[in-house]
Amino acid sequence: MTTSSGADPRLVASIRDLLAARDAGKTICPSEAARAVGGDEWRDLMQPARDAAHELVVSGEVEVTQGGEVVDVRTASGPVRIRRAH
């Protein structure tokens, strides 16, 4: 199942849940959401997890960072982190 933007709602919910369990200002890795949803098959969910993060960026809920700087998750290469929007 996907949302109108194409993001998997299970991954969107997982990102929200993981961030809710963290202290303010703390980050998560998209792989944490992928693992929570996909179990042993989590690697196949890495791009969908980044897509879910992008949906949450668009809605103003989160920011995606790399090296502490806010980046566009659609164009960033390499590891990124997700945090609640400031």
Image: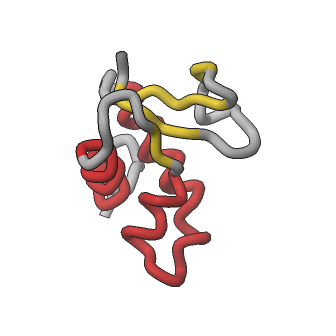
* 27 is higher (above) or lower (below) than 49: above
Foreground pick, 14 / 8:
14
Expressed as whole percent of the image width and height from the top left, the position of residue 86 reads 36, 16
In the depicted structure, whether residue 81 falls above or below residue 30: above
Q: Is residue 64 left or right of residue 69?
A: left
Tell me the residue at 47%/64% (across/down). Answer: 34
Residue drawn at 59 percent across, 70 percent down: 44
Q: Residue 18's spot in the image, x, y percent? A: 32, 51
Residue drawn at x 60%, y 26% as measured from the top left: 72
- Hey, which quadrant is residue 68 in on the image? top right
Q: Residue furthest right?
A: 77
Q: Nearer the viewer, residue 76 or 23?
A: 23
Q: Nearer the viewer, residue 42 or 74?
A: 42
Task: Give the quarter of the image for residue 56.
Answer: top left
Q: Is residue 17 left or right of residue 27?
A: left
Q: How many marks?
A: 0
Instruction: Report the side of 31 relative to 67 (left or right).
Output: left
Please give the name of the residue rendered at 33% of the width and 22% of the height, measured from the top-left corner.
Answer: 60
Q: Residue furthest top?
A: 86
Query: Residue 76's quadrant in the figure?
Result: top right
Q: Residue farthest to the front?
A: 23
Q: Locate the N terminus by quadrant.
A: bottom left
Q: Is residue 55 above or below residue 60?
A: below
Location of residue 58 with respect to 18 vertically, above or below? above
Please provide percent x and percent y for residue 7: 40, 49
